[in-house]
Image: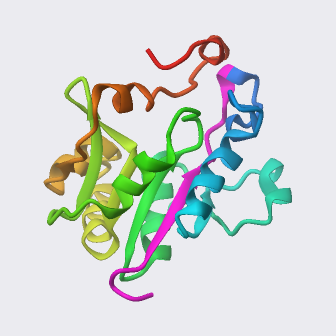
Amino acid sequence: MTPRSLVAGIFVGGASTRFGGHPKGLLAGPTGETLVDHLRGHLGALAIPCVLVGRRPEYAHLGLVTLDDEPAGVGPLGGLIALLRHAGSGRCLALGCDMPFVTRAMLDALATTDALPPALAARRDERWEPMFARYDAPAALSAALDREARGQRSLHGLLDALGAAALPLSPDEQRQLDDWDTPGDRARRPR
C-alpha cells in the first residue's frame, strides 16, 4: 500500500449477547438495508475499500475480506491490531457495525480531514468514539502492540496515548453516532 492509501474496517466480531447472538451488522437499519450494507454503500461511493474485522460465519455471504483478531480474546484491540497490520503503511478507518445513522459526509470528513497526530476520532461527552476513528497504521500499530503486551486493552487509552485529534462534528453529527447496543435502541432516532 502507498503511504496515503486508506482502507476501512467494519467491526463485526462482537458476540451480540443483548441481541440473542444475532449479528448486529445484519440487522435491518432505518432505511431497510443491513447496517453493514449501509456503511458499505457510503464507503463504496467514497471509493474507500472495506474489510470486515472479526470472523463470524453469518457474514460469509457478503464476500468481503475478513480479518481475524490478532490476538484473539483481547476485545476490539485485537481487531484493531489486525486492521492496522492489513493497512500496512497506509491509514485505516475503524468503524462499528452498529451505527445506523452515520452519513456519507461524516465518513468523508473522517477520511479526508487533515490531522497531524497518528489518530483522528470523534468525541462526544468528553469521551472518544474509538469505533469512528482514523489511524495512521505504522504509528498506531506500534502503540497498540505495546499496550496489548502490557495488558492495556482500552481503545480510549490508545487514542489518548497516540495524542489523537478530535474530528470536528456538529451537535447533529455527534447524535448520528448513536449506536444500537440493545434491542430497545432500534426504536429510537439519534438523541
x 59%, y 42%: residue: 97
x 24%, y 64%: residue: 143
Q: Is residue 180 visible?
A: yes
Horizontal side, residue 5 vs residue 114: left or right: right
x 13%, y 54%: residue: 163
* Viewer-proximal residue among 71 and 173: 173
Where is residue 40? Give x, y as percent.
64, 55
x 74%, y 50%: residue: 56
Where is residue 179? Give x, y as percent.
52, 28
Which quadrant would the N terminus be assigned to in this image?
bottom left
Numbered-mark total: 0
Horizontal side, residue 171 vs residue 44: left or right: left
State the residue lying farthest toward the bottom: 2
Chain part drawn in magenta: 1-18
Where is residue 184? Give x, y as percent.
64, 10
Horizontal side, residue 62 vs residue 129: left or right: right
How is the rendered protein coloured? rainbow
Where is residue 168? Give x, y as percent.
23, 43
Q: Is residue 70 visible?
A: no
Horizontal side, residue 151 vs residue 34: left or right: left
Task: Name which quarter of the figure residue 127 lies in.
Answer: top left
Task: Name which quarter of the figure residue 43 lies in.
Answer: bottom right
* Viewer-proximal residue among 74 and 127: 127
Which quadrant would the C terminus be assigned to in this image?
top left
Is residue 11 covered in magenta? yes
Is residue 83 covered in magenta? no
Residue 3, compared with residue 103, is above or below; it is below
